[in-house]
Image (cartoon, rainbow, N blue to C red):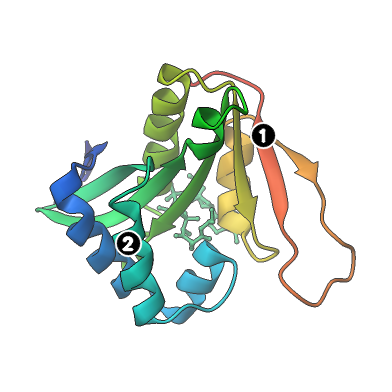
Amino acid sequence: MILRDDISISVRKLGFAELEDYRDHLLRLDDKSRAARFSGPVDDAFLKSYCLRLVLGPTQIIGAFNRGTLRGACEIDLTSHESGEQGKARLALSVESEWRGLGLGRQLIKESLITCFGCGADHVSMVIGQHGGAMTALARDFGFIESDPGTPGAVARSLTCLTPIMAVA
Ligand SMILES: CC(C)(COP(=O)(O)OP(=O)(O)OC[C@H]1O[C@@H](n2cnc3c(N)ncnc32)[C@H](O)[C@@H]1OP(=O)(O)O)[C@@H](O)C(=O)NCCC(=O)NCCS
């Protein structure tokens, strides 16, 4: 995928051995991005142990690479799907701030939805914080609709769950 003359991005599923690339990508996120991604502040130690836990789990990760470095990623959590809640999956995205606005997020959602539907999911959700303007706009473009408006006036990050209602073009 060519974004500009000087930037080309490869979007693909990460292999087991690439979890270190994912950890390094998460560690490069600034505090604000980490809080948006994890619904609250997280430090380096949290991110390292979070990635270690992924080794054992069923989570799939779609990544956006530039010249071998992972600049954006989407986690696909199919746990609920596999544990009997038929057809449910959850996505969580992150793109490093210097790489935003180039279309990585859009491409990651598209590839992730194709993966979800390919795995039999028919209900995909995302949890988005109250400052997630870009994420909400992108999700709506893919047919996600608000299913939980959160608590009005809540001081803590109010979360919105959106569900896609159309297939990927
Ligand atoms: C959300 C996020 C993944 C988007 O990544 P990205 O690579 O910049 O996404 P894209 O470039 O594909 O698209 C961004 C779109 O949002 C729009 N946008 C940016 N800021 C916006 C805002 N505040 N309000 C509305 N739309 C906004 C852009 O104009 C663009 O739309 P366009 O394609 O029609 O021009 C990235 O901002 C991020 O990592 N945020 C922090 C983590 C996070 O919030 N994760 C969500 C939790 S699931």
Residue hosting label 1: 163
Of the residues shown, which amino acid type is indicated by label 1?
Thr
Query: Which quarter shows the N terminus?
Result: top left
Left or right: where does residue 140 sit relative to residue 114?
right
Q: Is 5 situated left or right of 90 in this image?
A: left
Q: At 29% across and 62% down in the image, what residue appears?
A: 52
Position of 114 with respect to 138 (left or right) is: left
Can the viewer see residue 7? no
> Which residue has dot 2 on it?
51
Q: Is residue 20 found left or right of 147 in the rendered image?
A: left
Please give the label number shown on residue 93.
none
The answer to whether marks 1 and 2 mark residues whose Cβ atoms lie closer than 8 Å is no
Please give the count of numbered marks on the rendered protein: 2
Q: What amino acid type should be assigned to the residue bearing mark 2? A: Cys
Q: Which residue is drawn at 65% across and 66% down?
A: 131
| Mark pair 1, 2: CA separation | 26 Å
